[in-house]
Amino acid sequence: MPETAVAETGTELSPKELARRHGLTASGRLPSLPEYTRQLLSYRHFIQSHASAKMSSSLGSTKLGTVWQVLTPIINAAVYYLIFGVIIGTSKGIENFPAYLCIGVFVFQFSQSIVQSGINAITGNLGLIRALHFPRASLPLSTALVEIRNFVVALVVLMGIVLITGEPITAQWILLLPLLALQSFFNTGLAMFMARYGSKNRDIKQLIPFIMRFWMYGSAVLYPVTLFEDKLDGWQLALVEANPLLIFIELYRHALLENVTLAGAPTVLWLEALAWSLVVGIGGYVYFWRGEKGYGRG
């Protein structure tokens, strides 16, 4: 006679205790933050593969392919130099304005691309989200990874531009490594924040070009940072100088250029950059994690 399984009788365990005894968990439960982080680490190969696929698909249909990663910021810098450096004349007082301008454009475009891509990380992958189970943070992470790879290539080109315009290689160039790490961490948190916010507020996508343009004008990309000191004072000046992208751009200029006037002491700028990276990087990750159960629904 075959054996049959008999349910335990006479027990006074609650359903919750029975579920815990047999390793069952609630459906759709939000994992704890450490558990969620471990899940992401286990999906690192998926994140890398997804980032590589995005890079191939975005530029694979063009004749120049990945060359556009370098051409785009160079063309932008050339246009801005013609308008602001030659026509308007904002280059006065800056010894190497072409390099000064290129640094601002390249660094700002790094964060701008993260914002524009991050806001579509969820809404642009709804089919994938609804078909497969994986940590949703993989999507903004792969987006950030694509832009970090692009910026590394652009940074090499930027160093070439700086050399061509007459700047020497100095020991300060080594500061580019921790600076790249800080801005990448900041941008990744920014991508996660925009991914969750954009998934719930679709209209924000239409406002992003205007927001980024306003942010660019407040980051001393196109003109000397001393211009703010001539026009602003008190809390207004302090607010502008606390702009994280202005801080990152100033530190890149400090690392690559010899004679440049900064918005503050280098030590203060580094401390501010570290603070912004931790706040936005960790805050964006926690903010995205809190919305994990809602992505792809509705």
Image (cartoon, helix red, strand yellow):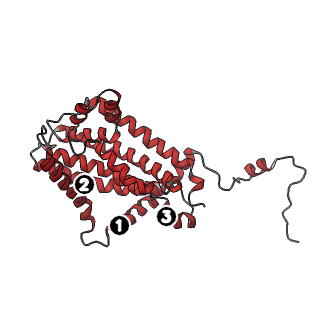
Q: In this figure, which residue is indicated by the disc labeled 1?
A: 58
Snapshot quadrant of residue 295:
bottom right
Residue 18 shown left or right of residue 145 in the figure: right
Marks 2 and 3, Cα distance to the nearest angstrom? Answer: 27 Å
Residue at the farthest top position: 234
Marks 3 and 1, Cα distance to the nearest angstrom? Answer: 15 Å
Residue at the farthest left position: 166
Residue 30: tell me if it is visible: yes
Does residue 63 lie above or below 89 as drawn? below
Quadrant location of the N terminus? bottom right
Q: In this figure, which residue is indicated by the disc labeled 2?
A: 154
Q: Could you say which is closer to the camera, residue 1 or residue 77?
A: 77
Q: Do callouts 2 and 3 mark residues in contact (Cβ within 8 Å)?
A: no
| Element at label 2 | helix
Q: Do callouts 3 and 1 mark residues in contact (Cβ within 8 Å)?
A: no
Residue found 30% across the figure and 46% down from its top = 216
Residue 177 shown left or right of residue 158 in the figure: right
Q: In this figure, which residue is indicated by the disc labeled 3?
A: 125
Q: Position of residue 161 (x, y in %)?
A: 15, 51
Residue found 36% across the figure and 51% down from its top = 210
**Residue type, numbered disc 1:** Ser
Marks 2 and 1, Cα distance to the nearest angstrom? Answer: 17 Å
**Residue type, numbered disc 3:** Asn
Marker disc for residue 201: none
Q: Position of residue 251 (x, y in %)?
A: 26, 38
**Residue type, numbered disc 2:** Ala
Q: Could you say which is closer to the camera, residue 293 or residue 221?
A: 221
